[in-house]
Image (cartoon, helix red, strand yellow):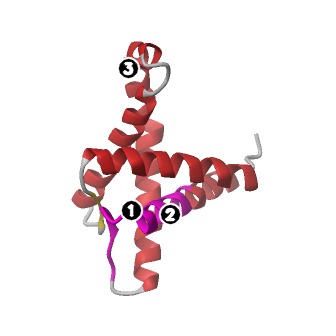
Amino acid sequence: MKNFVVKTIANAGALAVAVWLLDKITLTGDSTGKKAWTLILVALVFGLVNFLVKPIVKVLSFPLVILTLGLFTLVVNALMLLLTSWLADKLDLSFHVEGFWTAVLGGLIISIVSWALHVVLPDED
């Protein structure tokens, strides 16, 4: 349970950095508390997308990952971020990613920040 909470907080922090750095990734809300709550909910959606969908996409795109020497992983990360944005819209969460290239850059930022946060907050594994 502690591991789940740490990963969700790390995802929320990484998403917050992407929202802060990129104008085309938006998170709206009336107050800071509402924005924080929305960010945590979006982090949960993002975690579920990465847990359920990303492994399937990675297996199906494995030849492209090999062919591009791993660079196609950026596209997979961007697609997961776009899927999270779409699901957030369906769940009436005020999180939106505008465009594929914004998602690529956002996915890169989220990957770097998540990695750094996992170094600081290591798993129990």
Secondary structure, mark 1, is loop
Q: Which amino acid does label 3 sit on?
A: Ser
Q: Mark 2 points at which residue?
A: 17
Q: Which amino acid does label 1 sit on?
A: Leu
- Nearer the viewer's eye, disc 2 or disc 1? 1
The picture places residue 39, in percent across and down from the top left corner, at 44, 67
What amino acid is found at the position of numbered circle 2 in the picture?
Val
Please provide percent x and percent y for residue 73.
45, 30
- In this orientation, does residue 53 appear? no
**Residue 61 image label:** 3
Could you tell whether 102 is left or right of 111 in the image? left
Residue located 44% across and 64% down the image:
21
The answer to whether residue 112 is above or below residue 34 is above
Foreground mark, 3 or 1, reads 1
Of the two numbered discs 2 and 1 on the same chain, state the one appearing first in sequence. Answer: 2
Tell me where the magenta segment starts and ends, as one range: 11-29
Q: In which quarter of the image is residue 28?
A: bottom left
Q: Mark 1 points at which residue?
A: 22
- Please give the name of the residue rendered at 74% of the width and 55% of the height, measured from the top-left corner: 120
Of the residues under marks 3 and 1, which one precedes in the sequence?
1
Q: Which of 86 and 73 is in front in this view?
A: 73
Q: Which of 117 and 94 is in front in this view?
A: 117
Q: Is residue 36 visible?
A: yes
Secondary structure under tag 2 reads helix
